[in-house]
Image (cartoon, rainbow, N blue to C red):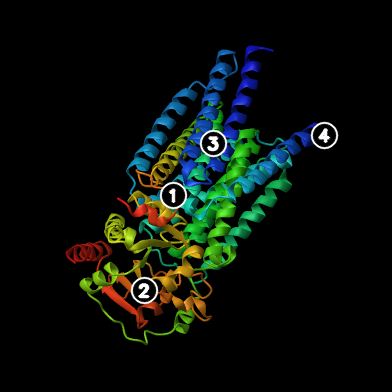
Amino acid sequence: MTTLEIVEVLVRIAWLVGAVGFVIGLSRMNSPATARNGNLVSAGGMAIAIGATAILILVSQANGVPVAGVAWVIIVLGVVLGGGLGLYTARTVKMTAMPQLVSLFNAVGGGAAALIAIDDYLGLAAGSNVRIDTHIFIVLDIIIGSITFTGSIVASGKLQGLIPGKPIQVPGGQLVTLALAAITVIAAIAVFIGGTPNLLLMVVILAAALIFGVTMTLPIGGADMPVVISLLNSFTGTAVAMAGFVINNPVLIIAGALVGASGAILTKLMADAMNRSVMNIMIGGFGGGDDAAGAAAGPGGSVRSIGADDVAIQLAYAQHVIIVPGYGLAVAQAQHAVRELAELLEERGVDVKYAIHPVAGRMPGHMNVLLAEANVPYPQLKEMDDINPEFARADVALVIGANDVTNPAARRPGSPVSGMPILDVDQAKSIVVIKRSMGKGYAGIDNELYTNERTGMLFADAKDGLAALTAAVKAL
Amino acid sequence: MTAAEINGLLEALTVFTLAILVGIAVISKVPATLHTPLMSGANSIHGIVLVGAMLIAAEATEPISQLLSLVAVAFATMNVVGGYVVTDRMLQMFRKKPVAAKPASDDAEVAS
C-alpha cells in the first residue's frame, strides 16, 4: 500500500471511531449523572472525525493529489468565522433564549448540507448522464436542507419575538404552500426523468424549497414551536445523511441517520405530551381560530385577588407545597427567586416539590434546565405523571407564570386545549397564582383555574411577587 | 447501473438503515428531563457535515465552488462549536446539591 492508501484506511477507521463516539455519547445522555460526560464523548468523536479529515486532505496534497490552492484558506477562514460566531453566541446566550439558538444552529447545519449538494451538482459535467440514485440524493439533500434552513430561521425568529409568535394566516396561504410542494415534486421528477444535469430545474427546486420552509413555519403558533424545531432537527439529520450519500461518506450517513431518528422520536414525544398529532401541528395554528375560542367557557366566575402576606402565611404553615413553574417565570428571570423561597420554606420543614409539565418553558425539559441553572436540586423536579396524584394532598399549589398547562378546560371537549394533558392543580386544597394580569396564554383562551373558588390571584411580576413572598415568610 | 454500483449503493443504504435503528434504540430511553439537552446534543452531532464541507473545499477550483464551500465550512463549524458548547452549558447545571445528602427521599435534601 502507498502512504496515501494507508492514511485513507486510517481515516476511515477514525470516522468509524467518531461514529461510535456519537452513539455512546447519546446513550450516556440517558441520565443526568452521565449526560455531561456523554456530550464530551460525542464532542471527542467529532474532534477525531474532523481531525482525521484534515489529515486526509494534507496527506493527499503531499502525495500529489490535486488540492485546490485556496482550500486551506477556505477551511481556516470558515472555521474561524463559524467557530468564533458559534462559540460567542453559545457562551453568551441567556438560558431562556437557548431554544432559538439551538434552532439557529440547526438552520446553519441544514444550510451546509444543502450547499454540499449544490456544489456537487455544479460539478457534474453538462450533458453527461447522471445516475438516478445520485440525482435522487442530490435533490433530496437540496430540498430537505433548504426547508430546514429557512424553516429554522423563521422558528428562531418567532421564539426571539422578531416575528410575531401568533399564527400568521394569510388568505390562501395553505394553497401557496401546497403549490410550492407540487412545484418541488414536479421539478424533481423532471430532473430524474431528464437524466442530465439541468441547472434551471435545480434553481426552481431550490427556490421553491426555501420559500416552502417559510410558508410552512409561519402559520404555526409559538406554543407549537418546540415540536417544529425538533422536526426540523430531524430533517437536518436526514439532509446530512443525504449529503453523505452524495459525496459517498460513511460518517455523514451514520451521524445523519442517528440524528434523523432522534429528532423524529423527540418530535413524537413532544406532540404526544400536547396530545396533538404532528400532522395537526404542521397544518395549522393553535385551535381552529375564532370558532374554537368561542366554545370555551367565558370568564363567568369572579376572580379573587390575594395579598403577599396572606400567601406567605399559607405557605409557611403548609406541610406540602407544589410549585408549578411556567415560561412566565423564566421570562421574569425568577428562577433564583423561586429557589430562595423554596429553601426558606424547607428550612421551616415544609415539603416543597416542583411540578414540571412536559412542555413547560419552550421545549421539553427546558424548565428543568432553567431551574437547574438556579441550583434547584433535580430530585425535587417531578414529572407530570408522578406529581399529579399528589396535588390532592398538597396544601398549597403555587402557580408561577404557567397558564394553559393548568387549565381544567382541557378535560372536556370543545376547547382549543381539549385533550391536552394538564397538571391537576385544581385538586390542591388551596391554589395561588402569581401572574401579572388576566392575560391569556398561547391558546388564547381564559383559564378556568383562575375563577376556581379556592384560587387566589397574586397580581405581580413573577420576580417581584416571589421577592415579596420571601420577605413576608421571613417576617413571620 | 452496474452490479458493483448497485452493491455499493446497497452497502450505504444498509449502514443508513442500521444507524436509524441504533438511533431509535439509544434515544427512546432518555427521560423527558433531558430532552432539551438531548435535542441540542443531537443538533451538534449533525455538525459532522463539516467533514463533507472540508472535502468539497479541497476540490473547489471554480470561484463559485470556493464561495459555496467557504459558507458551508463556516455554517458547519458554527453548528459543531456552538452546539457542543451550549449543550455542555446546559448539562453542567444538572447536579444535585454540592453536599450530596443520602438520595433516600426528597425530604433528605432539606438540610442546608
Numbered circle sitting on residue B48: 3
* Residue hosting label 2: A440
Label 3 resides on the chain identified as B
Camera-near label (4 vs 1) is 1
Q: Which residue is drawn at 66% across and 12% down?
A: A2
Chain under label 1?
B
Name the amino acid, label 1: Pro
Disc 1 to disc 2, C-alpha distance: 39 Å
**First-in-chain label (4 vs 3):** 4
Inter-mark Cα distance, 3 to 2: 42 Å
Q: Is residue A459 visible?
A: no
Contact between labelled residues 2 and 3, with CB atoms less than 8 Å apart: no
Nearest to the eye among marks 3 and 1: give it. Answer: 1
The mark that comes first in sequence, 4 or 1, is 4
Q: Name the residue under label 1.
A: B103
Residue A194's disc is none
Q: Which of marks 2 and 4 is in front?
A: 2
Circle 3: residue type:
Ile
How far apart marks 4 and 1 lie (CA) works out to 61 Å
- Image location of residue B24, percent across then percent down: 63, 48
